[in-house]
Image (tube, rainbow, N blue to C red):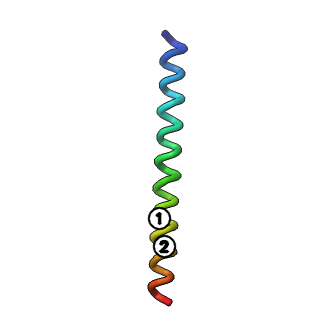
């Protein structure tokens, strides 16, 4: 039971990491687009 909880917690951590990375990536794309529009 404890191992299952540990595994699901790790999976949640991975999801949080990837969603945070995706947000950062999307922010970078938006920033690049704004810079290109400004030039």
Seen from the viewer's position, the closer of residues 39 and 9 is 39
Which residue in the structure is indicated by mark 2? 31
Q: Residue furthest bottom?
A: 39
Residue 16 is situated, as x and y percent measured from the top left of the image, at 48, 41
Residue visible at 47% across and 76% down in the picture = 33
* Residue with the mark numbered 1: 27
On the image, the x and y values in percent for residue 37 come to 45, 84
- Answer above or below: position of 21 versus 35: above
Image coordinates of residue 32 in percent, x first then y, are 51, 75
In percent of the image, x 53 and y 37: which residue is there? 14
Residue at image position (48%, 18%) is: 5
- How many marks the image carries: the answer is 2
CA separation, marks 1 and 2?
6 Å
Label drawn at residue 2: none
Secondary structure under tag 1 reads helix
Crowding around mark 1 (Cα neighbors within 10 Å: few <14, some 14 to 19, many 20+) is: few
Query: Dot 2: within a 10 Å radius of its alpha carbon, few (fewer than 14), some, or many (20 or more) residues?
Result: few
Q: Secondary structure at mark 2?
A: helix
| Relative height, residue 25 to residue 5 (above, below) | below
User: Cβ–Cβ below 8 Å for labels 1 and 2?
Assistant: yes
Above or below for 36 versus 26 = below
């Amino acid at each position: 039971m404890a191992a299952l909880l540990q595994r699901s917690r790790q999976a949640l951590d991975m999801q949080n990491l990837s969603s945070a990375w995706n947000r950062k990536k999307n922010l970078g794309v938006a920033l690049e687009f704004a810079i290109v529009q400004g030039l």
